[in-house]
Amino acid sequence: MSQPHRRTVVVLAAGEGKRMKSALPKVLHPLLGRTLLGHVLAAAGPLRADRTVVVVGHGADQVRAHLAEVAPDATAVLQAEQLGTGHAVRIALDAVPEATGTVVVINGDVPLLRTETVDALVAAHEGEGAAATVLAAEVPDPTGLGRIVRDTAGRLEQIVEERDASPAQQALREINAGIYAFDLARLRAALGKLSTDNDQGEEYLTDVFGLLVSAGEPVGVHVAADHVETLGCNDRVELAGLRRLLRDRVNEAWMRTGVTILDPATTWIDVTATVERDAVLDQNTQLRGATVVGAEAVVGPDVTLIDTVVGPAATVLRSHATGAEVGAGASVGPYAYLRPAARLAEKAKVGTFVEVKNSEVGPGAKVPHLSYVGDATIGAKANIGAATIFVNYDGVNKHRTVVGDGAFVGCDTNLIAPVEVGAGAYVAAGSALSQNVPPGALGVTRAPQRNIEGWVLRNRPGTVSARAAEQARTAGEDASGGPASASEGEAIHGGAETV
Ligand code: UD1
Ligand code: CA
């Protein structure tokens, strides 16, 4: 026999959530960084329960797999048939025969519940030595919820489901939030006496309250300070409503720590993300997963960051990043795509229509326009010209490219990996490089330029170009007394200088 348990948490998550109309079990629907179930487990986490039991049923395998990820210490207990919340709790407690003390039961679909509220419920319950305490709330619209029925002295008499309630009871606006604390021994005894004599023919956990009251046991009602915390989720419209409420709660908390959020209505921050002081989030910004935005960084408008770390004073504008790191003072976008293991060192620049994957962009290095950087190491202060492609894939394997410190890669260049451009080397615009360029050398692979005089007039007569060429020829003759000629041996230049 193991030690007696002082606190047990039971989460009810076996229901189908029919009205979600989803292949995904209701409790696995995501809400700003956690599933509905994940939020409930997070709220209960600080209770430090000896055991956490999650009752699974519909989509049991999926829910179990999720639990293994987010709450490996929790025990999943199968309720093969959903015969009611009372039945579900009975099965959960059968799995922990040695448990004693307090059991906290939470419906799996109340994601806005706060730890402080669960704590207050448990403190009130344990402080009064009650047999059972229910979390209640006054709500504007109690439709579909169980009602708290009190006697003339204001003491709890029973909890009645709406479908079993009299018209007078239906008029009550104090509802059962589906969150309770029980004395475990007395709960076990009462669960054995539940009937299925109700409109749904189910064992109702809520009937335990009436049974305890009849037996003269002390029961309590703890009223939530903010009814929003008790909102459940039954369909996708409610889910969207909860998402907005949680968004506002999260945004408000960050603003109070010193983050500027220019448009809170379009800024969506997962509960798992972090934003440091004096960061500025512009409109349409989403911070997801383990994203961190550093102090004084400016993110947005129109930015999605997933599991991405943005350093202090960096800027990210109209871009998408996943699994990336943006160094201090670095600049990203507009319209950049940073993929996993894109690592920008401090003051690096990744500009417009640039994609970076599994690459280091060195301190102060620049990739300003229209480029793909894959599997590369770019040295400090290197300059990568517009439309440079790091050709990393040969159809079978990926290869790396190294560009040394202070190197200068001209526009429209293919760096065919594996290849190395040495420190301080130049690569001529339009090259397709497959051999290394030594430090300080110029690498060129393009063919010399050839001009065929008079080609347009001969081959495209009557076109706009032909007319312009004719005009230029006449003007040239007028000015210099002879036709203009192209200079031979035009200098090769990098052509990557940009502002
Ligand atoms: C329940 C309460 C109601 C309360 C409401 C708050 C009962 C009888 N009624 O009603 O008083 O106002 O919650 O949201 O408890 N579940 C199981 N196994 C089952 C049945 C349900 O695990 O056999 C789980 C569901 O997955 C869900 C939770 O229990 O997470 C509540 O079940 P649900 O059917 O939504 O109960 P409500 O009708 O909302
Ligand atoms: Ca419900």
Image (cartoon, grey):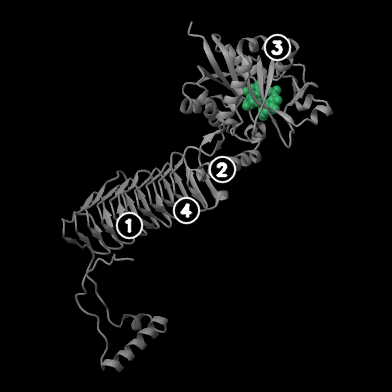
In the picture of the structure, the residue carrying the numbered disc 1 is 367
**Is 278 placed left or right of 215 in the picture?**
left
Residue 13 seen in the current view: no
In the picture of the structure, the residue carrying the numbered disc 2 is 247
Q: CA distance from mark 3 to mark 2?
A: 41 Å
Tell me which corner region of the image, top left, top right, bottom left or bottom right, holds residue 108. Answer: top right
Question: In the rendered structure, are the residues bearing label 4 and label 2 in contact, judged by CB atoms less than 8 Å apart?
Answer: no
Q: Is label 4 within 8 A of ligand 2 (CB to nearest ligand atom)?
A: no
Q: CA distance from mark 4 to mark 2?
A: 17 Å
**Is 151 placed left or right of 312 in the picture?**
right
In primary-sequence order, the first of circles 3 and 2 is 3
Residue 391 is situated, as x and y percent measured from the top left of the image, at 30, 52
Q: Secondary structure at mark 3?
A: loop
Q: Residues within 10 Å of mark 2 (few under 14, many from 20)?
A: many
Residue type marked 1: Val
Which of labels 3 and 4 is toward the front? 3
In the picture of the structure, the residue carrying the numbered disc 3 is 217
